[in-house]
Amino acid sequence: MNSRSPMVKLEYQHRQAAHCESGTISALLRHGGLDISEPMAFGLSGALSFAYVPVIKIGGMPLISYRMPPGYVVKGLARRLGLKIKFERFRDPVAGMQALRSHLELGRPVGMQTSVFWLPYFPPDMRFHFNAHNLVAYGFEDERYYISDPTFESPMEADGRALQKARFVKGALAPRGLLYYPVDLPATIDHRSAVEGALRQTLRVMLGAPLPIIGVKGIRHISKKVRRLGRGADSGDSQGKLFLGHMVRMQEEIGTGGGGFRFLFGSFLQEAGKLLQSTGLGEVANDFTDVGDEWRRFALYTAKMIKGRMEFNYEVLADQLQQIARLEESAFLRLKGLQLK
Amino acid sequence: MKIEDVPQDNSRAFAGERKALYAVDAEGNYTITVSNGWEAEDIVLELALTEFREHARAALLRVRTGKASPLEYHMYSKRMDAKVLSQSSGFFLWQVRRHCKPAVFARLPQSKLERYAEALGISVSQLQEIPDEQSEPHG
């Protein structure tokens, strides 16, 4: 040990968020003086999506995602708003921990990518091997770190060893100690062009993807898959249940804000509508509330069927997914028809 | 979803925590609000946790009857599978599978045991043993 400070605790406002990445970047920007709400950060990044990629398996389950890959919110938002975000990765965990301390000593709270499983403050039943969690460190005292984890209502603390493990876990989406912080923020934002750019991009993904596994087409694709599960000669109910359970977990578990990010997106549209004085955007926001509600209904039916409180019927679930696809398609088409200029 | 429809099912998995989500108030305005759990979510979470517990339970039996090495049990008890353990330890998938055989595991040098212990977050001596009872990950 040398003459470095034994303790730093920065003035940092913890705020809970629906999604870890949009919550982290929104809080870091607010700290830097740029007030961007979590839904705006999410929506402007263009991260809303749907993808069903059977060839990529995670824990034996196909990749099902309701948003773009991890890291997209921060990078997409930076690109859209012309923010300069500095990213640092480390080969050596000790160097990575020293860099974290140095930033904190300089008075700079930093965003970090970590594993969920190795964070000691996560409730045991929520600990899975997901390596793209995001949080902010805002201080330390000896070997304990002050953490603002947007998943939780209150600030947390983590012991340095555990934090190091969570930052340097190897495997899929390995964080490699990623630290990030804004270095240059614009004084003003052209909300109109940012919103337009984000909507164009989201529309491209949701309606115009050339692959049948992405966007609204992807929802129809997975509906067919669910129907096939029910018709398979040996559909193996436990396999089907695991598949559907996995899908619902990806949709509802911590970090999606419920309804597969659709409520978060609806909230973004509403806020954007107010900023740009567009009643049209406000109306489409309501459409996405309905879309989110239909996703929740899908989750509810699935859970009831798994529990045996409702007859297990793949056709009902496949129909519900078709219904969602129809609603999403018409909401996105309505969005496309809006003239924001 | 309306704020009054936000489920408050007091999920055991949340261990007293609440999570944030966006819902609309009486005027139709989106606001951030909290939920202490939703039963539907609990059901699918439980399904996934049961799957891991079952794997760990089966592995424990296999270790006791000499069909598997303790590595197999510890892998599942940390909610991993061979692929995740392979990625986090740096061993090839086929090596992990081979090291799950008792005879092969027994001959592993200290350095390889240390790599597994590090990936699993346990000590080498813990890695070489199995508990009397199945354990759950905890902080």
Image (spheres, rainbow, N blue to C red):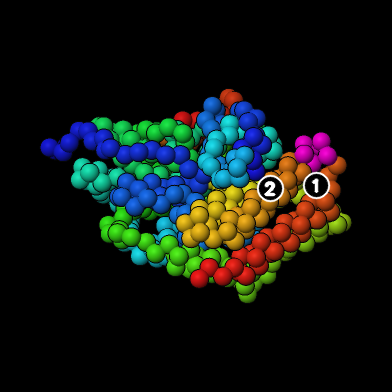
Can residue A240 be seen at all in this image of the molecule?
Answer: yes
Q: Which residues are magenta?
A: A304-310
Q: Which mark is residue A237?
A: 1
Residue drawn 53% across and 42% down? Answer: B31
Foreground tag (1 vs 2): 2
C-alpha gap between disc 1 and disc 2: 27 Å
- With respect to residue A230, does A76 lie above or below? below
Say which quarter of the image contains residue A193.
bottom left
Front-lying residue, B58 or A53: A53
Badge 2 density bin: few <14, some 14–19, many ≥20, Cα 10 Å:
some
**Which three-letter amino acid code belongs to the residue tagged 1?**
Asp
- With respect to residue A37, does B46 lie above or below? above
**Which three-letter amino acid code belongs to the residue tagged 2?**
Asp
Dot 2: element: helix
Say which quarter of the image contains residue A3.
top left
Side of A208 relative to B114 (left or right): right
Front-lying residue, A1 or A33: A33
Residue drawn 50% across and 55% down? Answer: A274
Residue B55, horizontal then vertical, whole percent:
65, 39
Front-lying residue, A285 or A228: A285
Say which quarter of the image contains residue B15.
top right
Residue A238, horizontal then vertical, whole percent:
77, 45
Badge 1 density bin: few <14, some 14–19, many ≥20, Cα 10 Å:
few
Q: Which residue is mark 2?
A: A293
A65 falls in the magenta region: no
Side of B61 relative to A256 (left or right): right
Residue drawn 58% across and 24% down? Answer: B132
The chain identifier of the residue carrying mark 2 reads A
Do discs 1 and 2 belong to a common subunit?
A: yes
Dot 1: element: helix
Q: Which mark is residue A113?
A: none
